[in-house]
Amino acid sequence: MDDETIEKTRRTAELYFRGVPAEDRPYELWKAFDRDLARDLSLFITGRMYARERIPHPVRQLVTVGCLTVLGRLEELRLHIEAALNVGCRAEEIAEAIFQSMVYGGVPAGNQALKVLREVLIGRGLWEQKP
């Protein structure tokens, strides 16, 4: 990979995953099994896909939250809710992406996603239950 992709990977990973413990980052899991493949996956996913500038990072993360909600991938959802907050998404926007996803993924999937959002917000000291 070229130096530009390596730098984009580093910057994008820091933007999305700052504050996320290393053991919760997929790269660390991949690396534990195959260091070379982990590098290749990271350069492609983080350095090429996540770093694309066709849509802003907040929009990209809201799309990702919606997809992970529909798929019911709660651990990965937690990681991307953190990333969404890191790139400037408001809790209300993340909740709305989840609510919109309920149409396609079902209410149970949306409820589980909202619980993950609430846990992340509580962990960050941002939870304010609405009346």
Image: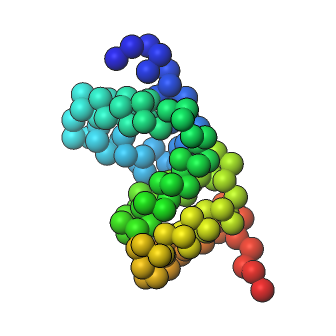
Question: Please, which residue is most extreme toward the right here?
Answer: 131
Q: Percent from the top left, x then y, of residue 77?
A: 46, 60
Image quadrant assignment for residue 127: bottom right
Residue at the location (61% across, 62% down)?
94
Instruction: Say how the picture is coloured.
Output: rainbow
Q: Percent from the top left, x then y, of residue 22?
A: 45, 44
Asked if residue 77 can be seen in this view, the reply is yes
111 shown above or below 8:
below
Question: How many callouts does the rendering have?
Answer: 0
Residue at the location (24% across, 32% down)?
37
Question: Please, which residue is most extreme toward the top here?
Answer: 3
Asked if residue 19 can be seen in this view, the reply is no
Tell me if 51 is positioned left or right of 59 in this view. Answer: left
Image quadrant assignment for residue 108: bottom left
Residue sitting nearer the eye, 95 or 37: 95
117 shown above or below 47:
below
Residue at the location (55% across, 32% down)?
53
Residue sitting nearer the eye, 101 or 127: 101
Question: Please, which residue is most extreme toward the left here?
Answer: 34
- Quadrant position of the N terminus in the picture: top left
111 shown above or below 83:
below
Q: Percent from the top left, x then y, of residue 79?
A: 48, 54
- Quadrant position of the C terminus in the picture: bottom right
